[in-house]
Image: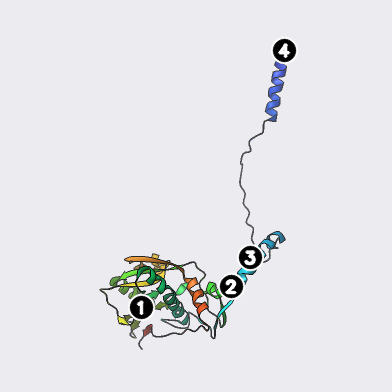
Amino acid sequence: MDLKNKHFVIIATTLLLLGCKESVPKLRNIEGQRIQINYSSSPKDSIENVIAPYRKRINQVLDSVLAYAPTAISKTDGTLNSPAGNLMADIVMQEVNPVFTTRTGQQIDFVLLNFGSIRSVISQGNITERTAYEVMPFENSVVIAELDGKAIRAMVTFLIKSSVAHPISGIQIIVDKNKSLQAVNIQGKPFDENKTYYVATSDYLITGGDKMDFLKEYISLTDSDYLIRNTLIDYFKKIDTLTAATDDRFMQIK
């Protein structure tokens, strides 16, 4: 092969190799599209067939009857305390106190939750696990805070000033017609500002949720690892008929 032909072969081979080289893709732009999924969307059979057995089982569990409510239980049927709030706070006290005692050897003195956490009325009729999810859809758990007398006094002042039926149990607050504090009793005994008290509340409130900043002043904190919703479910499984009412745990003397 003469030199001229040799150069031709080299150049042709080089061009052929460059032509066969795979180009590296480069990202030029990204586009997004919002696809709304609602009840008007047509389900795909392939996905529906996978989901159906799980949906059926979940509905079986959620709709199994656990108890019965002869009347509706609401958080708005009351001013300073309500049937729904009293019920929820009492349930937390009953279900969580044994857990706390087992772990620490101490007793919960009282419970404080927040009005806004009760998201639904408990309707008259059958009570199921779905009821608990409707009342308490959040994943909040119960924590027990040890508070000193100063923090307890701040809490009482907050509750009187807010005049909202926040759920409480184990504590009694009495005010006169002008909302001046008349008495605070904890577990049936007068409040002692020199003592510390164990207060069961939620992991939301302990961070100062709903402006309850006094809870952040805790001395010690114990996580029960017990969801508030699960306390409701466990309680529903133990009883036949669910009842609740307003009482004198937070009252104003006329």
Query: 64 or 10, which lies in front?
Result: 64
Q: Which residue is mark 3?
A: 54
Q: CA distance from mark 3 to mark 1?
A: 47 Å
Could you say whether the residue bearing mark 1 is in a helix, strand or loop?
Answer: helix
Bin the neighbour count of mark 3 within 10 Å (Cα to Cα): few under 14, some 14-19, many 20 and up: few
Estimate the x, y position of residue 108 in percent, counting from the top left.
37, 74
Say which of marks 3 and 1 sits in front.
3
Estimate the x, y position of residue 227 in percent, counting from the top left.
47, 69
Disc sitting over residue 4 in the figure: 4
Q: Which residue is mark 1?
A: 160
Q: Which residue is mark 2?
A: 62
Q: Residue at x 69, y 20 (%)?
A: 11
Could you say whether the residue bearing mark 2 is in a helix, strand or loop?
Answer: helix
Q: Residue at x 71, y 26 (%)?
A: 16
Q: Residue furthest top?
A: 2
Task: Name the kind of residue labelled 3 in the image.
Answer: Tyr
Q: CA distance from mark 1 to mark 2?
A: 38 Å
Q: Residue at x 46, y 80 (%)?
A: 87
Q: Are marks 3 and 1 in contact (CB under 8 Å)?
A: no
- Asked if one can make out residue 180 in the rendered structure from this viewpoint, the answer is no
Q: Earlier in the sequence, mark 3 or mark 2?
A: 3
Could you say whether the residue bearing mark 3 is in a helix, strand or loop?
Answer: helix
Q: Are marks 3 and 2 in contact (CB under 8 Å)?
A: no
Q: Earlier in the sequence, mark 3 or mark 4?
A: 4
Q: Are marks 1 and 2 in contact (CB under 8 Å)?
A: no
Task: Name the kind of residue labelled 1 in the image.
Answer: Ile
Bin the neighbour count of mark 4 within 10 Å (Cα to Cα): few under 14, some 14-19, many 20 and up: few
Task: Name the kind of residue labelled 4 in the image.
Answer: Lys
Q: Is residue 243 above or below residue 201?
A: below
Estimate the x, y position of residue 226 in percent, counting from the top left.
45, 68
Q: Are marks 4 and 2 in contact (CB under 8 Å)?
A: no
Which quarter of the figure has residue 131? Answer: bottom right
